[in-house]
């Protein structure tokens, strides 16, 4: 039995894992458009569980597409994606009540990020050093490789087909043959993408907004440095406080030279008092991997992109249901409604006198994960949308899996990715024991090595 829990704890229970082959637990990382937009993550990961007894879905909200037999279950309180189910062919021929695939014939999976404990004896084969590993599927659907460019291994060198009862649920339709529309509906034939607006939407399209290019107002917010660039466990508070008021979230654009010759300087944040290394090792080229190195400038007028990075903290994991949360740091003034004739409206703000958001679209559900810290998710499909707090109300973290820039899942025409560190990597095992902790540590270490360009990632 494995123990699971979401951030608020309302989904805490025990489940029986069914993904086991020769003592090795292999987690499938799915990069398809459907998974990205229904969760807000760059990739998702699930493990099969026994459908008898049926997992408890008390306190969970269900979401299913009318064109799919899959159903997602997320916590109605904190937004954590907990389960995913797929009805058997016999069951899918019957009308489902309230979109709930609660039949024992349904195939069930649990999000790996909610697993807090796996008994050591379940996956601890003395004959192999890889008792926990992963594999990627539907990477082509990302156009640029998505998160997989930093997670090149370890992967199984050989594998045999898994029994039907333990095979991971596949996206529907298969994005490798027919890429699904991330916004869930046909686009207008006359619609022309606006190069100065980056659309963002969840799978159900209930939550949709756009991001505009940096402008003079983008440099107005004041913010401490994030743990992403300045590890809080190692950096003096006097440095974290950003005394020089560096606008670290504003980054240089991709020039014509960059597009043809992506060999520029590394991402860096320069301060007079920071001792942080400004250089990060360059990446080696793979099918999707380029050398992401960008020159830091002190003038804001040439900034065309925003900083983005990855996080492995306990709160992000349990609020999303997945180990790696990807955030883009966007000024509130640059988060606007889609260009559909509606007035531009800031999507996220905090009243300085209260812990509750002051201006949010009704489609968003809010969860106060700690005093002054707000997390927002779609109340219909559960996609992670925003993180923001009362200390920097004008700078918002946007979940990158929602973005649809057209150039790829990482949206590098808009975002510069920080490759020097996985934020809060030391928290990857926080609140996890047994096999769950070992799996989390292996994944986090692999990602951080990949970010830094280590070939042994």
Image (spheres, rainbow, N blue to C red):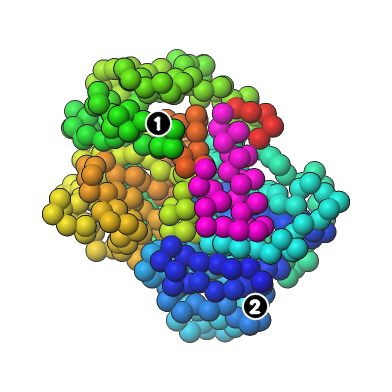
Relative to 380, residue 133 above or below: above
Question: Would you say residue 351 is visible in this rendering?
Answer: yes
Quarter holding the C terminus is: top right
- The reply to whether residue 380 is in sight is no
Q: Is residue 16 above or below residue 404?
A: below
On screen, residue 316 versus residue 291, left or right, reads left
Q: Which residues are magenta?
A: 426-452
Residue drawn 40% across the image and 37% down it = 232
Q: What label sits on residue 235 in the rendered view? A: 1
**Frontmost residue, 417 versus 388:** 388
Q: Which residue is nearer to you in this view: 176 or 28? A: 28
The local crowd at label 1, few if under 14, some if 14 to 19, many if 20 or more residues have their Cα within 10 Å, is some
x 47%, y 42%: residue: 424
Q: Residue at x 68, y 49 (%)?
A: 134
Prevalent SS, magenta region: helix
Residue 370 picture location, percent across and down? 32, 57
Find residue 313 and report its horizontal and vertical position in percent: 46, 48
| Residue 31 lies within the magenta run | no
Question: What label sits on residue 51 in the rendered view?
Answer: 2
């Amino acid at each position: 039995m494995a123990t699971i829990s979401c951030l608020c704890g309302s989904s805490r229970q025990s489940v029986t894992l069914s993904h086991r082959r020769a003592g090795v637990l292999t987690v499938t990382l799915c990069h398809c458009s459907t998974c990205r937009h229904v969760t807000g993550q760059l990739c998702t990961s699930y493990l099969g569980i026994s459908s008898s007894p049926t997992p408890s879905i008390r306190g969970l909200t269900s979401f299913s597409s009318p064109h799919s037999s899959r159903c997602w279950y997320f916590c109605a309180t904190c937004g954590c994606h907990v389960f995913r189910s797929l009805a058997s062919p016999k069951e899918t021929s019957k009308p489902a009540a309230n979109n709930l695939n609660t039949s024992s014939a349904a195939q069930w999976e649990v999000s790996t990020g909610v697993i807090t404990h796996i008994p050591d004896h379940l996956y601890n084969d003395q004959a192999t050093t890889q008792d926990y590993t992963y594999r990627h599927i539907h990477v082509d659907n990302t156009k640029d490789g998505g998160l997989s460019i930093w997670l090149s291994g370890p992967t199984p060198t050989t594998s045999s087909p898994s029994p039907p009862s333990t095979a991971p649920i596949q996206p529907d339709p298969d994005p490798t043959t027919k890429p699904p529309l991330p916004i869930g509906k046909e686009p207008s034939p006359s619609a022309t993408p606006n190069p100065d607006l980056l659309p963002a939407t969840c799978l159900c399209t209930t939550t949709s907004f756009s991001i505009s290019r940096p402008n003079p107002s983008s440099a107005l917010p004041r913010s401490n440095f994030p743990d992403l660039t300045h590890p809080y466990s190692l950096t003096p508070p006097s440095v974290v406080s950003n005394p020089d008021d560096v606008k670290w979230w504003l980054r240089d654009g991709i020039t014509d030279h960059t597009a043809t010759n992506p060999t520029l300087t590394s991402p860096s944040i320069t301060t007079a008092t920071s001792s942080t290394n400004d250089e990060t090792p360059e990446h080696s080229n793979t099918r999707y991997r380029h050398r992401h190195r960008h020159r830091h400038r002190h003038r804001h007028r040439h900034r065309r992109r925003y900083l983005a990075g990855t996080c492995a903290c306990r709160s992000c994991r349990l609020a999303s249901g997945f180990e790696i949360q990807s955030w883009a740091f966007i000024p509130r003034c640059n988060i606007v409604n889609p260009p559909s004739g509606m007035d531009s409206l800031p999507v996220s703000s905090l009243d300085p006198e209260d812990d509750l958001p002051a201006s949010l679209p009704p489609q968003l559900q809010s969860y106060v994960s700690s005093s002054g810290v707000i997390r927002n998710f779609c109340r219909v499909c559960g996609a992670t949308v925003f993180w923001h707090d009362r200390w920097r109300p004008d700078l918002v973290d946007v979940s990158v899996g929602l973005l649809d820039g057209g150039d790829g899942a990482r949206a590098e025409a808009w975002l510069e990715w920080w490759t020097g560190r996985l934020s809060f990597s030391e928290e990857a095992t926080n609140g996890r024991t047994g096999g769950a902790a070992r799996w989390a540590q292996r994944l986090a270490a692999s990602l951080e090595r990949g970010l830094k360009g280590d070939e042994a990632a």
